[in-house]
Amino acid sequence: MKNLEKPGELNTILGKGAYFEGVITVEHSLRVDGKVKGDVKTSDTLVVGKDGEIEGNVKAKNLVVGGKLNGIVDADGKTVLESRSEFHGEMKTRKLVIDEGAIFDGKCSMLGDDKKMTDITKKNDDIKNLEPTFKVQSR
């Protein structure tokens, strides 16, 4: 697992060969080396190992994918797609690292703080509504 600015305690592991269908909610970090069909939510880091597969929606602080992920991802922090990983779907994250050899098939939105984005949008709207302060006349 790559260092993602001091990830929390890894206390839940879905091992290789395991299969889970449904919704998983974990208080700390989660590592998936088996297969999950359903939604995954963790308050810290989700690691999908090289043999791990997730088909479903993911909500995590940080995400490291070494295996396969197919779905919608909402990662508040950093997302890393390692060299042999596959991602298919939609992703919203603050930081994205795609290692050479990774497959990314989908859409990604990278936003900063929501407040900053709201301020930028408001400023853009203010600029659009400005009246010209000078006029150019042709002769």
Image (cartoon, rainbow, N blue to C red):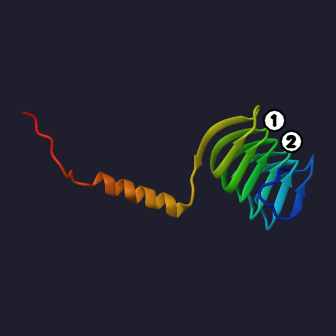
Instruction: Identify the disc placed on residue 112.
Output: none
Q: How many marks?
A: 2
**Residue placed furthest toward the bottom:** 27
Amino acid type of disc 1? Arg
Disc 1 crowd rating (10 Å Cα; few below 14, some 14-19, many 20+) is some
> At x 58% / y 47%, what residue is drawn?
109
Q: What amino acid is at disc 2?
A: Lys
List x then y, in percent, for residue 130. 26, 55
Q: Residue at x 76, y 59 (%)?
A: 23
User: Is disc 1 in contact with disc 2, using a CB cutoff of under 8 Å?
Assistant: yes
Residue 99 quadrant = top right
Q: Which residue is mark 2?
A: 50
* Residue 33 horizontal/vertical position (percent): 88, 48
Q: Residue at x 46, y 60 (%)?
A: 118
Label 1 belongs to which residue? 84
- Which residue appears farthest toward the left when viewing the image? 139
Left or right of residue 45: residue 33: right
